Image: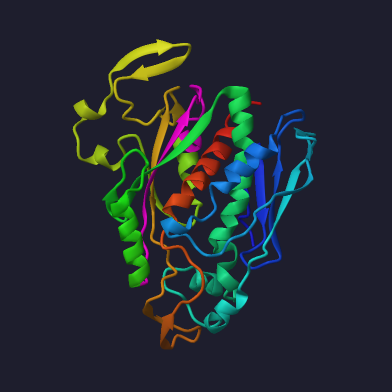
């Protein structure tokens, strides 16, 4: 199976599936002598864990990184960083009745058509795979902040069609989540990513545009179905006079515009303003309702999915988006 590596200068390779004994990563290309605070790394990883009140899965893993090489006494030694995570709370029996049935909205059918098997729990298509991305992102986040002052944040801007203000889920959002639990259904939402402190000049014209690379990275996350920058899809509705930002300043090599309608990237090259990107997150495909589908022989059948699944992954996915964005920036910047 190809496609398990990301990046050219800073290369992340991940391995392991949802119900394997362990999953892990190799992160290569970082120089020797970088400080990695393990408490900060664990706190970054914690942000991905499910929150019961927000519709999170009942599968709870410790997610303690087992560092095999590359970091010694909190300092990178210049060799590839190799980290494992144990999968200890696995209920593979939940999937026994799904061995020969395609779950709607899942990659079961395409995996079977390509590889000739339906992986238990989604295999490499499972959300469990994002743990390794977040671990790598937690390392890169520290390096980019310490050396370049680059930081990231992710903000929930909508959930299940309801607006979210100031990244705070209200009683209305919680009621909607509880209603989805009762209805055996799920909801998606939107996330805004903001990258602070990215210098001007990252990205190349034509085929190596920074926004193209960020789009590729974020769209590699299984639940993401769309991305946009700055004005995004609203750019199709407004006039050029509204879309064209007035340039109001240039300080220390950083452009300042009136409204940052381009989201910090012009011509595929960073301007020095905040990079602003929005991502659309689909509803969790594993729902408890009876659904109509087919088996591996093409025969119509009904399917009722049991097990432990998120009503929504929106509160958990922001840190995954940040991780992929930071890994992208790390591949454009010179250490």
- Residue 139 in the figure: left or right of residue 171: right
**Residue at horizontal 62 percent and vertical 59 percent from the top:** 61
Decide which of 159, 201 is in the foreground and name it: 159
Task: Name the residue located 50 percent from the left edge and 53 percent from the top edge.
Answer: 221
Residue 190 point in image, percent of width and height: 36, 48
- On the picture, is 228 further left or further right than 1? left
Number of marks present in the image shown = 0
Query: Residue, x 29% and y 20% (percent of image)?
Result: 258
- Position of residue 97 in the picture relative to residue 34 (left or right): left
**Residue 185 seen in render:** no
Please state, as top left, top right, bottom left or bottom right, where the N terminus lies in the image: bottom right
Q: Is residue 327 above or below residue 124?
A: above
Quarter assignment of residue 192: top left
Percent coordinates x, y for residue 142 in the rendering = 62, 32
Give the residue displayed 43% in from the left and 80% down from the top. 304
- Say which quarter of the image contains residue 28: top right
Relative image position of residue 26 (x, y in whole percent): 71, 48
Magenta stretch: residue 328 in it? no
Q: Is residue 82 visible?
A: yes
Q: Nearer the viewer, residue 53 or 155?
A: 53
Query: Can you say whether 278 is above or below 130 in the image?
Result: above
Quadrant in the picture for the C terminus: top right
Estimate the x, y position of residue 24 in percent, counting from the top left.
69, 54
Tell me the magenta residue range.
184-210
């Amino acid at each position: 199976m190809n496609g398990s590596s990301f990046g050219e200068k800073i290369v992340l390779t991940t391995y392991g599936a949802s119900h394997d004994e362990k999953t892990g990563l190799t992160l290569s290309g970082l120089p020797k002598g970088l400080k990695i605070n393990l408490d900060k790394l664990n706190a970054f990883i914690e942000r991905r864990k499910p929150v019961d009140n927000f519709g999170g899965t009942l599968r709870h893993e410790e997610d303690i990184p087992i560092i095999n090489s590359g970091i010694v006494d909190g300092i990178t030694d210049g060799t590839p960083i190799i980290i494992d995570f144990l999968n200890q709370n696995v209920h593979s029996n939940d999937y026994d009745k799904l061995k020969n049935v395609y779950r709607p909205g899942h990659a079961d059918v395409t995996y079977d058509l390509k590889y000739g098997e339906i992986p238990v729990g989604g295999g490499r298509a499972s959300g469990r795979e994002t743990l390794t991305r977040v671990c790598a992102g937690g390392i890169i986040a520290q390096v980019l902040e310490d050396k370049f002052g680059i930081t990231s944040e992710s903000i929930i801007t909508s959930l299940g069609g309801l607006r979210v203000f100031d990244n705070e889920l209200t009683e209305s959002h919680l009621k909607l989540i509880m209603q989805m639990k009762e209805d055996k259904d799920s909801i998606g939402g939107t996330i805004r990513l903001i990258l602070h402190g990215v210098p001007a000049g990252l990205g190349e014209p034509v085929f190596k545009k920074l926004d193209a690379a960020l789009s590729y990275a974020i769209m590699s996350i299984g639940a993401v179905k769309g991305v946009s920058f700055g004005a995004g899809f609203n750019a199709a509705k407004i006039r050029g006079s509204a879309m064209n930002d007035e340039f109001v300043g240039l300080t220390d090599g950083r452009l300042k515009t009136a409204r940052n309608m381009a989201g910090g990237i012009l011509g595929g090259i960073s301007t020095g303003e905040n990079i602003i990107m929005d991502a659309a997150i689909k509803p969790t495909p594993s729902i408890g309702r009876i659904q109509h589908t087919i088996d591996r022989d093409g025969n119509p059948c009904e399917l009722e999915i049991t097990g432990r699944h998120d009503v929504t992954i929106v509160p958990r996915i922001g840190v995954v988006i940040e991780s992929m964005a930071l890994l992208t920036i790390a591949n454009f910047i010179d250490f």
